[in-house]
Amino acid sequence: MSNKILFLTTLNLATNPRLVKEIKLALLNDFSVEVICFEFDNWSKGSNEKLKLQLENVNIITIQAGRNPFFSWITSVIVEYVFRFLGKYFSLPIPLLSQAVSRRSNLILKALKQVSKPDRVVGHNPGALWPSIFASEKFQCPAGFDVEDYHPGEGDDMNMHFLTNELMIRTLSKMDYVSFASPLILEAVKKDLNEDISNSLTLLNYFPAKEFKKPVILNSGLVKLVWFSQNINTGRGLDYILSFVQQEAGNIELHLIGNLNADFHDVALKGIQNIVFHGSMSQNTLHQQLGDFDIGLALEPAKDENNDLAISNKMLAYLQAGLFVLASNTKAQESYLKELPNHGICFDYKINDLGIVLNNLINEIDSIRAKRLTRYIDFKNRNWENESVKLLNVWNK
């Protein structure tokens, strides 16, 4: 059995929880692990340092994502810009196309000199596509890749859409396996490739069951709504609900968990008395605290195609905690909740009838609270422990 895995990512550990779950899965199953990742000097730094301490048995090779060393940084910026420009007009070789998609791609290639020979390479994020194939050829081992998001549909830069799509089309077929975080992302990538992906598996982003406590049934008090994200900021769907929260100050309380953007607070949140702010939390603490709320808000705004096709992590966390979910009807969220009518409901983000839907939920809050334990038990088998078996089977081949 192959027993050494090398993970490659263009992010740090704190901003890539799916990667961290895969690392922990490998360690639990007696694989030895090396990781090439980046370091950011921003809000995620503290969380990242804690994760590195938790993974003391992992050989973590870190690359600075900032401007130090300056020459290395400025070179990668210029190279990325040049190849992005050329990619508009010419079909670039895969190594150059990779640098057009992410300046960090070449930095990962350089860092490969520091690793020992792996038995398997697993890439995360588009900038790691070519390095994963390169490492596979260099070390003569299989390569896998995780498509957590529909990367060609992220943001509104059409040239980046084209370049990322081109890179995925030309590299995914070379992978030993490809995992996808939602069925609709898999379908979209199949359409792009114009072929079935025989080595694919859908791996929903569930969390470990042990992170969620058995819920306490709340019988009275304000209806407690919760929303979390790495950053509390504009463009994340909160705009749908704020006016309603203000109007219903006597009935509901909105809890926001994450890194609060000061400008967004001053412009949109200041003065709303029934909003309670919590700082950023570790994943485990967050999942434990979800048990204290009634309704989880998955307010994805379908800001781009990826946002429409992805099943949000927050929705899965709410469901595992036994909360009733109120979600925007993005394609992925609506499709998923249709299978679980007792666990949540969608509102139409295009006309924003959230106020009407939420008002109905407030009227039914006694019933929603009474069924909390039932929802928690019904969902108990949908967790990372069970979902990850599919990935482990591929690794063990």
Image (cartoon, helix red, strand yellow):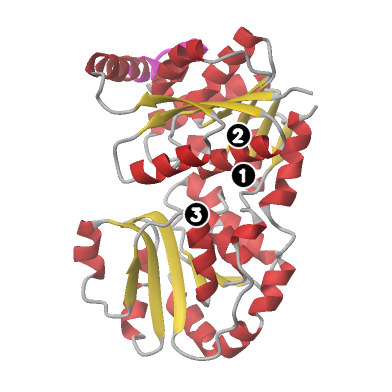
For label 2, the crowd category at 10 Å Cα-Cα, with few meaning under 14, some 14 to 19 and many 20 or more, is many
Q: Which label lies toward us, 1 or 3?
A: 3
In the picture, the disc for residue 146 is 2
The residue depicted at 45 percent of the width and 54 percent of the height is 282
- Circle nearer the N terminus (1, 3): 1
Q: Quadrant of residue 258?
A: bottom left
Tell me the amino acid under the disc marked 2. Asp
Judging depth in this view, the residue of 336 and 72 nearest the camera is 72
Q: Is residue 248 magenta?
A: no
The percent coordinates of residue 230 (x first, y second) are: 40, 52
Boundaries of the magenta span: 84-95
Q: 206 above or below 192?
A: below
Disc 3: which residue? 283
Q: Secondary structure at mark 2?
A: strand
**Amino acid type of the residue tagged 1 in the rendering:** Ala
Residue where numbered disc 1 is placed: 181
